Amino acid sequence: MIVGRHGGQEVVPPECDFFSNSQLPPEFVQPQDREEKQDCELAAAKRWLRAWGNHYSPWGMTILGDDLYCHQPFCEAAIEQGFDVLLVCKPDSHSTLYDWIADFERI
Protein backbone atom coordinates (compact mmCIF):
# COMPACT_ATOMS: atom_id res chain seq x y z
CA MET A 1 0.00 0.00 0.00
CA ILE A 2 1.25 3.44 -0.91
CA VAL A 3 -0.29 6.62 0.42
CA GLY A 4 0.18 9.63 -1.81
CA ARG A 5 -0.96 13.21 -1.75
CA HIS A 6 -3.17 14.24 -4.62
CA GLY A 7 -4.02 17.56 -6.19
CA GLY A 8 -6.03 18.42 -9.27
CA GLN A 9 -5.76 15.74 -11.93
CA GLU A 10 -2.55 14.17 -10.62
CA VAL A 11 -2.24 11.63 -7.85
CA VAL A 12 1.12 13.06 -6.79
CA PRO A 13 1.81 16.46 -8.33
CA PRO A 14 5.44 17.11 -9.37
CA GLU A 15 5.66 20.19 -7.16
CA CYS A 16 4.74 18.15 -4.08
CA ASP A 17 7.82 17.67 -1.95
CA PHE A 18 5.91 15.62 0.63
CA PHE A 19 7.77 12.39 -0.14
CA SER A 20 11.21 13.99 -0.16
CA ASN A 21 10.69 15.55 3.26
CA SER A 22 8.37 13.16 5.08
CA GLN A 23 8.12 9.49 5.83
CA LEU A 24 4.91 7.80 6.84
CA PRO A 25 5.12 5.62 9.92
CA PRO A 26 5.37 1.93 9.01
CA GLU A 27 3.11 -0.88 10.14
CA PHE A 28 5.04 -4.14 10.08
CA VAL A 29 3.72 -7.55 9.15
CA GLN A 30 4.31 -9.53 12.33
CA PRO A 31 2.41 -11.89 14.61
CA GLN A 32 -0.14 -10.05 16.75
CA ASP A 33 -0.99 -10.88 20.36
CA ARG A 34 -3.96 -13.23 20.77
CA GLU A 35 -4.26 -13.82 17.01
CA GLU A 36 -4.51 -17.37 15.75
CA LYS A 37 -4.08 -16.51 12.08
CA GLN A 38 -0.73 -15.47 10.62
CA ASP A 39 -0.34 -11.73 10.03
CA CYS A 40 -0.48 -10.37 6.47
CA GLU A 41 -0.06 -7.14 4.50
CA LEU A 42 -3.81 -6.48 4.42
CA ALA A 43 -4.13 -6.81 8.20
CA ALA A 44 -1.13 -4.49 8.64
CA ALA A 45 -2.72 -1.94 6.29
CA LYS A 46 -5.95 -2.03 8.32
CA ARG A 47 -3.94 -1.48 11.53
CA TRP A 48 -2.17 1.45 9.87
CA LEU A 49 -5.53 3.00 8.95
CA ARG A 50 -6.76 2.66 12.54
CA ALA A 51 -3.54 4.07 13.99
CA TRP A 52 -2.80 6.88 11.52
CA GLY A 53 -5.90 7.44 9.40
CA ASN A 54 -7.25 10.39 11.38
CA HIS A 55 -3.84 12.06 11.31
CA TYR A 56 -3.16 11.78 7.58
CA SER A 57 -6.61 11.88 5.97
CA PRO A 58 -7.00 15.70 6.29
CA TRP A 59 -3.93 16.07 4.06
CA GLY A 60 -5.95 14.95 1.01
CA MET A 61 -4.10 11.67 0.59
CA THR A 62 -4.93 8.84 -1.79
CA ILE A 63 -4.23 5.22 -0.97
CA LEU A 64 -2.72 3.37 -3.92
CA GLY A 65 -2.64 -0.40 -3.86
CA ASP A 66 -2.60 -3.58 -5.84
CA ASP A 67 -5.30 -6.24 -6.05
CA LEU A 68 -4.48 -7.42 -2.53
CA TYR A 69 -6.17 -4.32 -1.08
CA CYS A 70 -9.06 -4.18 -3.54
CA HIS A 71 -11.76 -5.68 -1.31
CA GLN A 72 -14.87 -4.03 0.07
CA PRO A 73 -13.96 -4.05 3.80
CA PHE A 74 -10.59 -2.38 3.21
CA CYS A 75 -12.02 0.13 0.73
CA GLU A 76 -14.82 1.03 3.14
CA ALA A 77 -12.37 1.45 6.02
CA ALA A 78 -10.14 3.76 3.95
CA ILE A 79 -13.08 5.84 2.70
CA GLU A 80 -14.56 6.10 6.22
CA GLN A 81 -11.22 7.52 7.37
CA GLY A 82 -11.48 10.18 4.64
CA PHE A 83 -8.99 8.79 2.12
CA ASP A 84 -9.49 8.43 -1.60
CA VAL A 85 -8.48 5.04 -3.02
CA LEU A 86 -6.97 3.99 -6.34
CA LEU A 87 -6.63 0.22 -6.47
CA VAL A 88 -5.84 -2.40 -9.11
CA CYS A 89 -8.55 -4.98 -9.84
CA LYS A 90 -7.41 -8.18 -11.55
CA PRO A 91 -9.87 -10.10 -13.73
CA ASP A 92 -9.39 -13.36 -11.79
CA SER A 93 -10.44 -11.87 -8.47
CA HIS A 94 -13.04 -9.38 -9.75
CA SER A 95 -14.86 -11.37 -12.42
CA THR A 96 -18.22 -9.62 -11.91
CA LEU A 97 -16.63 -6.21 -12.42
CA TYR A 98 -14.97 -7.37 -15.62
CA ASP A 99 -18.29 -8.86 -16.81
CA TRP A 100 -19.88 -5.44 -16.33
CA ILE A 101 -17.06 -3.78 -18.25
CA ALA A 102 -17.52 -6.26 -21.09
CA ASP A 103 -21.25 -5.45 -21.15
CA PHE A 104 -20.49 -1.73 -21.50
CA GLU A 105 -18.01 -2.41 -24.29
CA ARG A 106 -20.75 -4.23 -26.24
CA ILE A 107 -23.04 -1.18 -26.12
Image: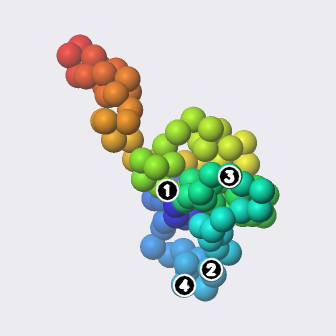
Q: Earlier in the sequence, mark 2 or mark 1?
A: 2
Q: CA distance from mark 4 to mark 2?
A: 8 Å
Looking at the image, tell me whether mark 3 or mark 2 is earlier in sequence order: 2
In the rendered image, residue 22, in percent from the top left (x then y), is placed at 63, 81
Q: Residue at x 73, y 48 (%)?
A: 81
Of discs 4 and 3, which sits in the foreground? Answer: 3
Q: Name the residue tied to disc 3.
A: 36
Disc 1 target residue: 64
Instruction: Compute the Cα span from label 2 to label 1.
Output: 16 Å
Q: Find residue 59 and report its horizontal and vertical position in percent.
A: 69, 62
Q: Residue at x 77, y 62 (%)?
A: 33
Instruction: Measure the C-alpha gap from mark 3 to mark 1.
Output: 29 Å
Which label sits on residue 79? Answer: none
Q: Residue at x 47, y 55 (%)?
A: 65
Q: Are marks 4 and 1 in contact (CB under 8 Å)?
A: no
| Mark 4 surroundings: few (<14), some (14-19) or many (≥20) residues within 10 A | few
- Label 3 residue SS: loop
Secondary structure beneath disc 4? helix
